[in-house]
Image (spheres, helix red, strand yellow):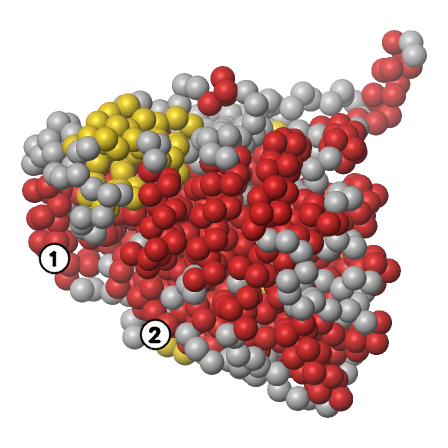
Amino acid sequence: MGLLQQAALLLLVYGCSAPAPFPWSDVRLPETVRPLHYDLLISPDLTHLNFTGEVRIRIAVARDARAVVLHSKGLRLSGARLLTSGHTRPLRVLELPGFEQIALLAEGWTIVRGAHEVRLEFAANLSHSFHGFYKGYYKTRRGESRVLASTQFEPTHARAAFPCFDEPAFKANFTVRLRRESRHISISNMPKMRTVELAGGLLEDHFETSVRMSTYLVAFIICDFLSIRKTTKHGVEIAVYAVPEKISQAEYALNTAVTLLDFYDDYFDIPYPLPKHVLLLKKHMLYSCVDPVDLAAIPDFQSGAMENWGLSTYREAGLLFDPEKSSTSDKLGITKVIAHELAHQWFGNLVTMRWWNDLWLNEGFAKFMEFVSLSYTHPELQVNDYFLEKCFKAMEVDALVSSHPISTPVENPSEIREMFDDVSYDKGACVLNMLRDFLSPDAFKLGIIHYLRQYSYQNTMNANLWESLNNICHSEDSEQGRLKLDSFCARTNAKNAASKWFMEDELDVKSIMDTWTLQEGFPMITVSVKGREVRLSQERYLKGRDPLKASGFLWQVPLTYVTSRSHTVQRFLLKTRTDILYLPEEVEWVKFNVDMRGYYIVHYESGGWDTLVNLLHINHTTLSSNDRASLISNVFQLVSIDKLPLDKALNLSLYLSQEREIMPVIQAFSELVPLYKLMEKRDMELLENQMKEYILLLFRDLIDSQSWTDEGTVSQRMLRNYMLLFACVRRYAHCVTTATQLFRQWKDSDGNMSLPSDVSLVVFTVGARSEEGWDFLLEKYLHSMSSSEKRTIKSALTFSPLAHKLQWLMEQSFEGGALKTQDLPSLVISISKNPKGYRLAWDFLRTNWHKLINKFDLGSSSISRMVTGVTDQYSTHEMLKEVKDFFGSLEIETGSGLRSIQLAIEKIEENIRWMDRNLPLLKGWLDNHHPLSRLPLV
């Protein structure tokens, strides 16, 4: 094309002038312009599935500028103008789609330093995904489809609903107006002040101005939900919203939210939602009226829940409890999710991380507070029995080269979305639990209260938290707190060389915790006892072949231990690569990492493992159930890196025939079941069946002792479901006979017979093995109004050996027909664990990859979980090549750089190494300890 032709084209496209260059070149917004207040109007059309809107943003400009840069994604923009000093001036809009940014240009004039107002009009279609402002639907009992629209903005999707400064540090106040038809209601973060009637029958709801908050916490819903309400003892009104036919299932969530909000108000000593002037007048008890808290069950929702300030949103199965059909597991899950989201009102909403690299300050704290809060408010749920699971789960990821530090640099939206993983949530919670144990619960509590008060309505980094915890002995937040801290502060000043808890130095929380948050992985502590002398060393625990990647790591490790002579917990801060501690007397055994309160594993040399294995066989209850669970985990993890032979771990497992506590049993299953799951994907049926029968034999007495009822403590009921499900899936005759009889009775009653909720999954799983049973269950799924029952039936359907049914499930869920698309990730992962479905799941993931990343978002936890979940039981070079070839064919825009892909590949490589090293040992050990055909199977 010649120069004249180029010029003509430019004139045709842009008018008289060529396009101006975009005035900003960073994915992060400039800090010279900050939002102060948004006046936002949203007008959705639920018939045509689109929306229009207007936004007025009051901004503070730090220095003279020619442009205002902010975020917008997929919006049709118009009417851009700047109101300044009583005058309105037009702004030219430039878009930079790659960064999801727009620039509002002042052409021929300057936006001077000071306060101004930006005005924009916009329009878009309601999103067909699960983020931004998106459409949803539900079906009534009569089969009528009803449409709603709701939001999911975290982490970077507010920009798809309205132009905004969509970064967590750009906090502002929001005044929201929502238009709707009279058949709908609208809900937002703040209470509704009034409703105005408009021409054409529309209504416009005006909401109070919010507190200062980040854009990702803004929320609004247009729906026909009903609500129930209750007031806390602190005067906060709580409402739970749900579709009309399910509002009867909201009572448990309402009562739970009331109890938990009261607990958090008291625990943090900061009232919800803490208007700024309360901070100044608190000592004089001058409180303003308190804004309400709303919880809404959304029929279409990708994640588990979202902590929008004042309007938290949930999956229906994460909020609604059916007393007749929800299991103990359902109740525990719902309670934990509510505890998590309400904790966010302080950790995340009141005080927010400055940038997404410190997401764990939100999510790690909220996960941690689930367990702290429920141990007080719901002791009957026995939540501390399940905290170890979170640490073991995090360690599975953190033991790989492709893990990342808790605090990790991220920039673009897909990198940000990948931060919502086990490291941010579970490892974050585990290191906080370790720090709490290190400082003492009272000192830790006072430190985080100081942190929340000092940084209310602000943004923080790691260092701000460590500073608050480091200065607790000088804090004057409360006299009561000072009294509680007396013993702790005296202890930090003491120079106790024997305990070496704080060594010779002053307490330095930052130095300790930087070693846990700024580097990936975790330490393996090697212990060698000789007389009274205990030699200690640390190195990174790392799976894989490259020892160089484990070098250069050093942690400050708060060690705890008990001995055969004393069950009083002793403490030792290991700050160097090696050290020595001296016991007051010689002992028969020593057990480090008491109750798994620390985020590390322990290797016992010099006969230490033999002594502990022998102790478990002679009297396993000498150690706590958590200590037994941690020994089970540690011994098998040490096999994975060749520190111990496999027969050592299997010899330890023999004691499990005596075990009755849930955590050691669950951890044993977590270590033993994957061994035969790897074999299921290979042609080695004989050894596979031998391993399955060994596990059945190990737990046969425990399985046979289970009743088919809902009796017992929460942990006993959870264990019952776990044991019976395993036994029936493994076709243990005693279990299958009872489950088959119950399913037949339930089916003959047309599903009206009341089954014990804790064993319904077991019964349905056995029923789903036949075509007739599977079809009957599907019919009941389609017509059920119970979210818990639907989830139970769906799980049972995925366990079926009927391959064509498994394929149908994935296709239907993908289309959003008989099954909702929100359930597709968990459904695909569940089918991938089924020996009849693992190839189907992998082929489905490959075939539909590009559609999946559009629906669920590149880098989202849904995509990451499918990548790792579908592939983590492969252990052959052929499957490794398939996985590498497929993901290697992707472009950056379609996911080639995802961390989850690297995790998946590394996991398969580790599985191959494990099988190559240990299969002959496993076969030899099983031949000696468990010949085949000793149990009645069907």
Residue 895 location in percent, x, y?
Answer: 70, 34
Say whether residue 373 is visible: yes
User: In the rendered view, does 4 fall on the left or right side of 891?
Assistant: right
Please tell me whether mark 1 sits on a helix, a strand or a loop. Answer: helix
Residue 645 location in percent, x, y?
Answer: 50, 35
Residue 754 location in percent, x, y?
Answer: 62, 86
Q: Residue at x 87, y 21 (%)?
A: 9
How far apart marks 1 and 2 lie (CA) works out to 24 Å
Which residue is tagged 2? 232
Residue lying furthest top: 3
User: In the rendered view, does 756 fall on the left or right side of 712?
Assistant: right
User: In the rendered view, does 10 fall on the left or right side of 644?
Assistant: right
Say whether residue 832 is visible: no
Q: Residue at x 54, y 54 (%)?
A: 669
Q: Residue at x 64, y 62 (%)?
A: 934
Picture quarter containing residue 316? bottom right
